[in-house]
């Protein structure tokens, strides 16, 4: 039986259907907007993995090209196993607001799968998948403290637009995804064109208010057709043992808190852990329980220090940023580089400039797209003192890299002004705090070092939150431990003029407008401070691209001469590319783009191209080769691929009986251009030179 509810959201009808397909899943719904349909299912295993310290939750999002009537372009002609970056990013925006809303102690393996069944390329499926994940969990027997509604907010011509279409987003100054419960915002992610904190805040809460009907629909559907929820065993804490742990660990925990260095602090805590276990577990049967209680005590101890005593780890103030050092040009052979260090977080970032051929090509539901700007974020195990295998980028790596990408894209020069492809690579060398924000700062400096004319320098900062009852403390430039023990991770990227990218995750029920506004204001203060530190190393983009970067020149030729430059089967352009060690790109308008290793090579190549594509000028004298002889005259090649006719009457000052009496094929003679008609036919004369 089909059960359906719908509401108008942002001027569009969004419907939620259940009971028709995928009925063996615990929760199964179909989200629909226009002709875009997304199936979302939720299933949880019956057995509980009680020994796990976290919820084994898996979120998957799949874009099927059949949904837009296309066959995949890869060799296998099917969706390959590895998800695209866009699929990974959508998985992350679904996972982050859902995970904190499962009951504490629920440990059954849980999986949510969202599949795009139909896409009209106007109504975007990712937001349907986000709301659909919440609804599938609501309809299932899986314990879940939802609902959650998700939507995208744009800012077009000074007005906020909920769930703008693909075409509308092209002119939008904001593209921010918001997830919210009935009471608060629980996740934010997106980009903006240097908008103010007030404009960003208003946009987020515009989405919050206008998404509430989606939460109401889910509750309506759940009330009528949802399954009874599984019971969740209450987490039992041994109060007596907890008291003993706190008594034994109190003094040692104070030492842990006051140890600034990350590795040293970890060592001090490990020693404390061993002491507490040795004191309370002589039989060796309760060590896991004791360690978990000690971890809980550590979290509450540090939170109280911050909230009650206004003291952070390392003794910083709540709005204080760690010491920063910056260096550009660290790598001598790259086109641009920067070493950015903030406290115990360090990123080495390089910039490489390339031609149009170096653009990234990506197959999406909207067809093949190209990316002129690429940012790759790498997080090797040594940066946190760990040992693990080196694999491809994780979902976390892709998410952090995308956050940095969005923050830097807003300040890139227009392609018409700077036609290079740009690749930025961030190697995180140390991590204790936000390495994605270090990547933003290092990426901005590395591009300026490479001579990329950025509109403005960009910096980023990670903000935290500790909320105990009515007491709220907002933290600037959070450490890894502060992220772990805190209630919010809010990353804000921008210039001195405004915000270009942001991402917020929370671990509590949500944050209100006041808290978010205060966090944005404090983030701006920190962002401006970091920009000032960066400017001590490099304050503006280099006036020229780096020595080792390819040099770019543009030359315009007659479109009719394109075939002469390319040659049969591309022979001539390939030979030129090899001879001058350059990349040559020609478009249909006759615009020739040249990327050469040096300015001298680029200039020499242009001269060669001019020779190949030159056009005959009336009155000009050329030395040409006789190619063909006819009874009425001789055809002479005066330029590569360009022939003109010397009529028999123009071969000599005296009468000529036979053409071969004057010239033979292969002869080199001087001729003057008499005329070029509107069909491009060239009339030449040898006689004119003999007379003159």
Image: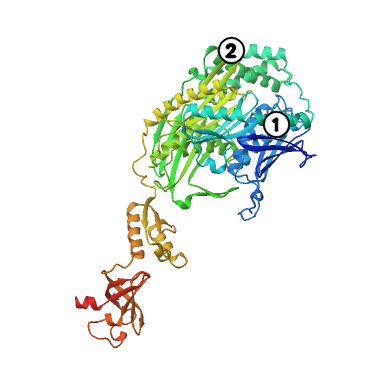
Q: Nearer the viewer, residue 565 or 83?
A: 565
Q: In which quarter of the view is residue 307 placed?
A: top right
Q: Visible in this render: residue 38? A: yes
> x, y percentage for residue 115?
68, 43
Q: In which quarter of the view is residue 110 placed?
A: top right
Q: Eyeballing the image, is 390 above or below 649?
A: above
Q: Is residue 528 left or right of residue 654?
A: right
Residue pictured at 42% horizontal, 27% vertical: 528
> x, y percentage for residue 674?
28, 73
Q: Nearer the viewer, residue 631 or 103?
A: 631
Q: Neighbour class for label 2 at 10 Å: few (<14), some, many (≥20)?
A: few
- Disc 2 marks which residue? 251
Residue 44: give its label: none
Q: Mark 2 and mark 1 in contact? Answer it, CB < 8 Å.
A: no
Q: Is residue 670 left or right of residue 12?
A: left
- Disc 1 marks which residue? 217
Whole-angstrom CA distance, mark 2 to mark 1, is 52 Å
> x, y percentage for residue 626?
33, 77
> Mark 2 falls on what kind of element?
helix
Colour style of the rendered protein structure: rainbow
Q: Eyeballing the image, is 374 above or below 74?
A: above
Q: Visible in this render: residue 430? A: no
Q: Nearer the viewer, residue 141 or 19?
A: 19
Q: Eyeballing the image, is 450 above or below 586?
A: above
């Amino acid at each position: 039986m089909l059960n359906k509810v719908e509401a108008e959201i942002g001027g569009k009808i969004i419907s939620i259907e259940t009971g028709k397909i995928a009925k063996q899943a615990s929760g199964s719904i179909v989200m629909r907007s226009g002709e875009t349909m997304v199936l979302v299912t939720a299933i949880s295993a019956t057995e509980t993995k009680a020994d796990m310290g976290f919820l084994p939750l898996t979120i998957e999002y799949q874009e099927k090209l059949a949904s837009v009537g296309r066959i995949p372009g890869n060799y296998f002609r099917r969706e390959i196993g590895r998800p695209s970056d866009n699929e990974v990013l959508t998985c992350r925006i679904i996972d982050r607001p859902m995970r904190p809303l499962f009951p504490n102690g629920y440990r059954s393996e849980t999986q949510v799968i969202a599949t795009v069944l139909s896409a009209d390329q106007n109504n975007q499926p990712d937001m349907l998948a986000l709301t659909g994940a919440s609804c599938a969990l609501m309809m299932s027997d899986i314990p879940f403290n939802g609902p959650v509604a998700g939507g995208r907010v744009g800012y077009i011509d000074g007005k906020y637009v909920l769930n703008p279409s693909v075409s509308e987003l092209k002119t939008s100054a904001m593209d921010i995804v918001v997830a919210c419960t009935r009471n608060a915002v629980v996740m934010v992610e997106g980009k903006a064109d240097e908008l103010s904190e007030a404009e960003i805040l208003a946009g987020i809460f515009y989405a919050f208010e206008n998404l509430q009907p989606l939460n109401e629909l889910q509750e309506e559907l759940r009330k009528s057709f949802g399954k009874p929820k599984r019971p969740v065993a209450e987490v039992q804490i041994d109060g007596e043992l907890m008291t003993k742990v706190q008594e034994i660990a109190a003094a040692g925990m104070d030492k842990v808190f006051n140890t600034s260095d990350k590795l040293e602090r970890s060592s001090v805590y490990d020693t404390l852990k061993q002491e507490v276990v040795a004191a309370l577990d002589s039989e060796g049967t309760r060590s896991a329980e004791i360690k978990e209680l000690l971890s809980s005590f550590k979290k509450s101890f540090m939170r109280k220090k911050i909230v009650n005593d206004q003291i952070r780890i390392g003794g910083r103030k709540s709005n204080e940023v760690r010491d920063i050092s910056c260096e550009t040009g660290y790598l001598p052979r790259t086109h641009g580089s920067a070493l950015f260090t903030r406290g115990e977080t360090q990123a080495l970032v390089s910039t490489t400039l390339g031609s149009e051929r170096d653009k990234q090509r990506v197959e999406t539901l909207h067809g093949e797209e190209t990316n002129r700007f690429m940012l790759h974020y790498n997080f090797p195990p040594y940066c946190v003192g760990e040992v693990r295998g080196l694999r491809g980028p994780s979902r976390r790596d892709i998410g952090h890299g995308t956050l940095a990408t969005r923050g830097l894209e807003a300040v890139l020069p227009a392609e018409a002004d700077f036609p290079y492809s740009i690749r930025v690579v961030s190697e995180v060398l140390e991590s204790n705090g936000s390495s994605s924000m270090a990547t933003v700062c290092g990426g901005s400096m590395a591009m300026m070092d490479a001579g990329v004319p950025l509109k403005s320098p960009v910096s980023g900062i990670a903000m935290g939150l500790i909320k105990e009852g009515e007491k709220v403390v907002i933290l600037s430039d959070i450490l890894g431990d502060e992220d772990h023990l805190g209630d919010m991770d809010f990353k804000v990227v921008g210039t001195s003029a405004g915000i270009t990218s942001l991402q917020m995750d929370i671990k509590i029920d949500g944050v209100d407008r006041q808290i978010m506004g205060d966090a944005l204001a404090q983030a701006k203060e920190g962002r401006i401070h970091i920009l000032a530190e960066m400017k001590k190393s490099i304050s503006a983009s280099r006036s020229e691209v780096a020595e080792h970067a390819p040099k770019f020149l543009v030359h315009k030729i007659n479109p009719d001469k394109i075939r002469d430059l390319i040659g049969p089967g591309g022979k001539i352009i390939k030979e030129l590319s090899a001879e001058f060690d350059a990349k040559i790109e020609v478009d249909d308008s006759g615009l020739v783009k040249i990327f050469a290793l040096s300015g001298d090579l680029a200039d020499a190549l242009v001269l060669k191209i001019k020779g190949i594509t030159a056009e005959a000028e009336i009155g000009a004298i050329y030395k040409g080769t006789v190619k063909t002889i006819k009874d009425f005259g001789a055809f002479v090649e005066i330029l590569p691929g360009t022939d003109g006719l010397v009529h028999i009457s123009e071969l000599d000052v005296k009468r000529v009986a036979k053409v071969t009496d004057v010239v033979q094929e292969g002869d080199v003679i001087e001729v003057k251009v008499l005329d070029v008609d509107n069909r491009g036919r060239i009339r030449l004369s040898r006689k004119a030179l003999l007379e003159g």
